[in-house]
Image (spheres, rainbow, N blue to C red):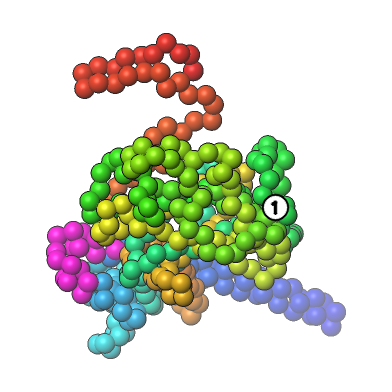
Amino acid sequence: MLIITVIVVSFLRLMLSDQNQATNANLAESARNSALAGVEDAKRALLRYNEYCNTHSDAECSALATTISADVCNQAVRVGDVVSNDVESGGNGSQPGEIKVQQTYDSNDRLLDQAYTCVLLKLNTDDYIGVVGASATQIIPLVGADDFDRVTIEWFSRDDLGSGTTTVSLESTASSRLMQSTWPTTRPPVLRTQLIQFGDNFKLSDFDAMSGESSNTNSIFLYPTSNGTQTVQSFTARDVRSGGVGEQAPADAAIDTPLGVRCETSLSSGGYSCSATLVLPAPIGGGGRTAFLRLLPYYNATHYRVTLSSGASATPVKFNAVQPEIDSTGRANNVFKRVASRVDLYNIGSVFPNAAVDISGNFCKDFSVTDVEYIAGTCTP
């Protein structure tokens, strides 16, 4: 009888333990879903903010930005009635309470007691982060909260290595381009970094010109090595063009070689393997800068991080409403989950073209286009 009793009690304990684990897993998933509901409401708040700034003055837009970026829980989602007051509970006036997310007509839903307790929205961020596939492109608006003249690019994180290794495979120097099949998966990609910008007095021909140290478009190929340089590099220093303004020819291939960038061989402590700081030229004609950074990795995909700075002292400059950060905490009963998310906001109504023509094989350029007709050429692609 004693042995049977021990067996029954042990079996009941196992059943109860499994039931508790299943319940906790369900509550954890429900709490995460509550946090994601807060992220979605914050996205709606960003859309309201964007629409507001399109129809109001800069001062009014700045005032709203200060309001929704305040370090007050759920304040961002309450501006513009993104959520109504009747779904809020527990508020004490200055600190808005949690926002219920369950369906009130469903008794089983109410038992979960779901809500997001705190959503914080940060319009200005320290960096721009993301991931881009091999031979794919990412266009990043360079919009700072203050003046900036240089951009730092970090790429290839531990997530790119895969599981089971923290060692990065690197060459000692920048060599000639290799076949895709010979490039190790544990090596950072060659990163084509292109600047596209214009000032107040922009002409289309300025994209083909350099005027002293001023330029509107430049490209540098960043080659990962173990012995490369970590010094600050100018975008225009490796761009060689001949002739006067408007008559520059493309840089000679023998001169415009990839820039060897020193990368870390171990990612055991996290971070990024490669880093390069590039000084931006002034736009031709001067005036305010409207700039974009185009990243195109060859051979491998990569995670990346872009930061802005100013001057030789590299004073950090925040991105201004380019990739806002959302911090949302959700709850289901007494279980909490916290989610951090980034949202691309700059010119959300616009589509940035990756290329005018982007192909992997040959391309025939023998054709003519006028305002009334298209004339095909004689060459065969």
SS under mark 1: loop
In percent of width and height, residue 297 lies at 55, 47
Q: Describe residue 182's horizontal placement relative to residue 119 as left or right.
A: right
In percent of width and height, residue 93 lies at 24, 87
Most common SS among magenta residues: helix
Which residue is more in the foreground, 209 or 225?
Answer: 209
Q: At label 1, which amino acid type do we have?
A: Thr
- Is residue 60 part of the magenta span, yes or no? yes
The structure residue drawn at horizontal position 46% and vertical position 33%, both measured from the top left corner, is 358
The structure residue drawn at horizontal position 62% and vertical position 61%, both measured from the top left corner, is 229
In percent of width and height, residue 326 lies at 40, 68
Q: Quadrant of residue 261?
A: bottom right
Can you say whether 85 is above or below 250 in the image? below
The image quadrant where one finds the N terminus is bottom right
The structure residue drawn at horizontal position 37% and vertical position 75%, both measured from the top left corner, is 120
The structure residue drawn at horizontal position 39% and vertical position 64%, both measured from the top left corner, is 149
Can you say whether 253 is above or below 237 in the image? above
Residue at mark 1: 173
Which residue is more in the foreground, 203 or 177?
Answer: 203
Is residue 343 in view? no
- Is residue 207 part of the magenta span, yes or no? no
- The residue lying furthest to the top in this view is 378
Q: Describe residue 57's horizontal placement relative to residue 33 as left or right.
A: left
In the image, which residues are magenta?
46-63
> What count of labels does the image hold?
1
Q: Quadrant of residue 71?
A: bottom left
Is residue 120 in view? yes
- The residue lying furthest to the left in this view is 56
Which residue is more in the foreground, 123 or 74?
Answer: 123
Crowd class of label 1 (few under 14; some 14 to 19; many from 20; radius 10 Å): some
In percent of width and height, residue 291 lies at 35, 55
Q: Describe residue 20's horizontal placement relative to residue 3 as left or right.
A: left
